[in-house]
Amino acid sequence: MAVTAPPKLLFRQLFEKESSTYTYLLADIAHPDKPALLIDPVDKTVDRDLGLIKNLGLKLVFALNTHCHADHITATGILKKKVPTVKSVISRSSLAKADILIDGGDKIRIGNLFLEARPTPGHTTGCTTYVTDDAPHHPNPRMAFTGDTVLIGGCGRTDFQGGSSEKLYRSAHSQIFTLPKQTLLYPAHDYRGFTVTTVEQEALYNPRLTQDEEAFINTMKKLKLPYPKMIDIAVPANLVCGIQDSKI
Amino acid sequence: MAVTAPPKLLFRQLFEKESSTYTYLLADIAHPDKPALLIDPVDKTVDRDLGLIKNLGLKLVFALNTHCHADHITATGILKKKVPTVKSVISRSSLAKADILIDGGDKIRIGNLFLEARPTPGHTTGCTTYVTDDAPHHPNPRMAFTGDTVLIGGCGRTDFQGGSSEKLYRSAHSQIFTLPKQTLLYPAHDYRGFTVTTVEQEALYNPRLTQDEEAFINTMKKLKLPYPKMIDIAVPANLVCGIQDSKI
């Protein structure tokens, strides 16, 4: 009888300074193939990320996006050109193209590890939070990659791409804050030098999301944020994996 | 008989963009006081760090420096003014002032956790790497805070403040690369968006430190780096905990 080694997570958080974006590398290094995935890779840092993956002896299998970004161009298209076996992944509700369109509850598997997709609309229609499992041998505390839904002491804006403050509030409270309180939350961005937070920290101290729903909606209405400088380039590109002439 | 709870590490990595400096927050949250320490705090981010410490319910006990920095001003002096019970810590060989001057092998204790000081001269005379313990209930894999001795895919420059390429090479190989290969290495800086590495990764792929000693010394000689723009302000300030008129 074949014995399956319990998963062993290799994890790296990576930062792209210009858009203050975090990319995440996860791999099951107990599996003989060392299969890996990237979450929210950025076009400008693709060579850095592939160099690291090569050095670590990993096999990149999936390139996931938490949503169709408006502030940078995803590296999924370039990654697929450079590593043709890589499959791009995004939620079906994002309306973006990808090799694999996921729905809530779907699992992305690398070796004996997986991430489960939780729909967390609000910043955009298709926002998804990817969550590790709670079974033995899986990361403890659990980890959730929240995209722009819950940021550290903040949240994504809700004024474009099908944004809805009501939906974001409900997504955060029903899909993220219901995770165990020690769950590590890794956002798509941070602008102040924070790298990670927890469910407990955000549920207690997030200045926006600790308000009641009505006050939160009012706060978001009053933000009057400038038009995002990259949106007209990034969104059309990201709808097709970051490459306008890509066949996905 | 009193039962001592095993330590439980709370860990946060924090980034200061201007000098690309990492500050680290560690606390023993199994201890009733939740005692905490900061490694390499930066003056410009002291309010951010104290806000986080307050939100997490921690008691800041120590502010450590890995060395007398030339590229930013340490926050130890400001921290001592804002939280008078905080003790500053640096190596005796740095020749800087601090409440606690440590030598190789000394331990900095917070609750039931501790960091051991390993002298790793080379970038400066007083450079120290702080390493977690390998006993049960301590972080596994171990963690080492390497300052500017080993950077991710690099190392600190060796052309000022008593710098010595020979010493840096020997420090890295005898004090850092001898740790278990999965030990997580957290540097004082990264300029490319990496956040962490391992002994294994650096021992195999660090382009400078995988050379033999002679080749390494030649590489460092040829760097011809510009004069550090902050050095004339930062070093005198950091010799007195970051505040020129400080009585430590």
Image (cartoon, coloured by chain):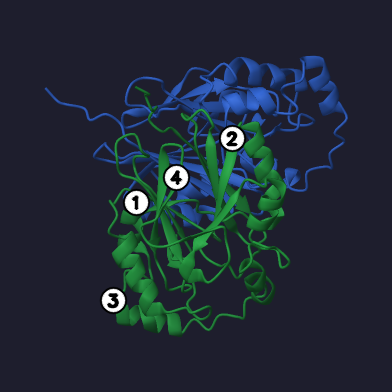
Chain colours: A blue, B green
Local packing at callout 2 (Cα closer than 10 Å; few below 14, some 14-19, many 20+) is many
Coordinates of residue B187 in the picture (x, y in percent)? 48, 57
- The kind of secondary structure element at disc 2 is loop
Residue under disc 1 on the same chain as residue under disc 4: no
Above/below status of A164 relative to A30: above
Residue A3 quadrant: top left
A13, A48: nearer the viewer: A13
Residue drawn at 35 percent across, 66 percent down: B172
Local packing at callout 3 (Cα closer than 10 Å; few below 14, some 14-19, many 20+) is few
In front: mark 1 or mark 2? 2
Residue drawn at 40 percent across, 78 percent down: B165
Tell me the CA gap for discs 2 and 4.
Answer: 15 Å
User: Would residue A246 be visible to someone looking at this image?
Assistant: no
Locate the C terminus of chain B by quadrant: bottom right
Residue drawn at 62 percent across, 22 percent down: A120
- Give whichever of discs 3 and 4 has the lower sequence position: 4
A12, A73: nearer the viewer: A12
Give the label on residue B58, or none: 2
